[in-house]
Image: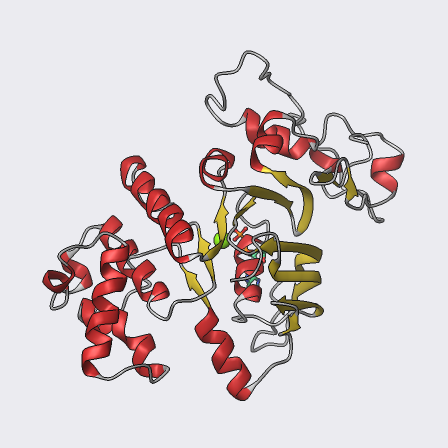
Amino acid sequence: MSQPSQPIIKMDRISKIYRPKRTLFGTKTADKIVALDQVSFQINRGEIFGLVGESGSGKTTAGRLMVKLEKPNKGQVFLDGQDMTRIRGKMLKDFRARVQMIFQDPYQSLNPQLSIYDTVAEPLVVHRRGDHNGRNEKVAQALSAVRLTPAEDFFPRYAHELSGGQRQRVAISRAMVLNPEFIVADEPTSMLDATTSYQIFSILSTLRDKYHVTFLFITHSLAAANFLCDRIAVIYRGNLVEMGPARQIIRHPAHPYTMALLDALPIYCQDSACKFHNTLLKTPRETPDHDHCRFFPRCRRADLNQCAGERPTMVHLSDTHSVACFKAV
Ligand SMILES: Nc1ncnc2c1ncn2[C@@H]1O[C@H](COP(=O)(O)OP(=O)(O)O)[C@@H](O)[C@H]1O
Ligand SMILES: [Mg+2]
């Protein structure tokens, strides 16, 4: 296995723009949406990396781009140093076995007509891995890895017979069955209750330790990211605003938006040093019509000239911690 600090996956200045669709009458449905704007980050082998932001900030788009369910308008995606942006044919098929995605809604992501065995075995069939006995063994291993045991008891069952947490574990075992190197988990617990979510976190953490899988964990909750992740990137309206070790981000946030996310948690740490940052304006300012910091309209700390007049780029606060904010540096 490679060194733990080597990047397995890298996004290099990725932009994704959704263009408006024309209706039957030739009118546009909406303005173009910049879902991601020059986003760069890399995830190291064996890491659980958190991507955190509010709804609509571009998290799912970033995850889908990393597993090639979407194409970027600009920028490149690298897997193990190799540019994957324009691969096709056999290379794409190999890529599809090396990276996987777990979706938010376990009620929608499983085919109700397939038994649990067929659900988990399907990727093996598609990628022509193993014979009948070999597949049985791999499916049993994948179900046991997510603590659905005895695995054979689950083989003939169907998704509708299982709880939400069990369904999500089936989805994880389907993602694991080809022994992937990298998995995007897109808000895998947002439909589940707190104790079930905790079980899922614990399973993801065990899979990383035991099978050396690298995860991108997408969440709207800094608390969940802090619990599970080694490093965290915070995204706001398609722009990365802060990135660093989870503990550093929680204890010493540098971007006013990260601070606002922390303020929104009921109790984010027991430490007396934790304070209420109060960085959000009650009434947003008007959005400038030229380039500006995306957070400017909502930021209490903004400088009315600089923040309204240019876009901050990511700068290093330390070797591991970076931020895109004029007021933080
Ligand atoms: N297929 C699509 N077509 C048009 N707009 C989209 C599409 N997918 C996402 N978007 C838009 O891109 C932005 C980012 O969406 P998304 O990545 O789903 O955010 P998140 O996962 O953080 O909630 C949103 O404004 C969303 O409406
Ligand atoms: Mg999403």
- The residue at 24%/69% (across/down) is 139
**Image spot of residue 11 (x, y percent):** 66, 61
Q: In the orientation shown, which residue stands out farthest toward the top?
A: 272
Classify 292 as above or below 158.
above
- The residue at 39%/67% (across/down) is 179
**Image spot of residue 55 (x, y percent):** 52, 46
Count of marks, rendered view: 0
Q: Is residue 19 visible?
A: no
Q: In the orientation shown, which residue stands out farthest toward the bottom?
A: 89
Q: Is residue 230 visible?
A: yes
Q: Quadrant of residue 249?
A: top right
**Image spot of residue 182 (x, y percent):** 48, 62
Q: Quadrant of residue 287?
A: top right
In this picture the colour scheme is: secondary structure
- The residue at 69%/49% (across/down) is 239
Classify 157 as above or below 215.
below
Relative horizontal placement of residue 148, taking residue 199 as reference (left or right): left
- The residue at 51%/87% (across/down) is 90
Relative horizontal placement of residue 174, taking residue 281 as reference (left or right): left
Given residues 237 and 84, the one toward you in this image is: 84
Relative horizontal placement of residue 238, taking residue 171 as reference (left or right): right
**Image spot of residue 69 (x, y percent):** 52, 71
Given residues 149 and 96, the one toward you in this image is: 149
In the rendered view of the protein, which quadrant contains the C terminus?
top right
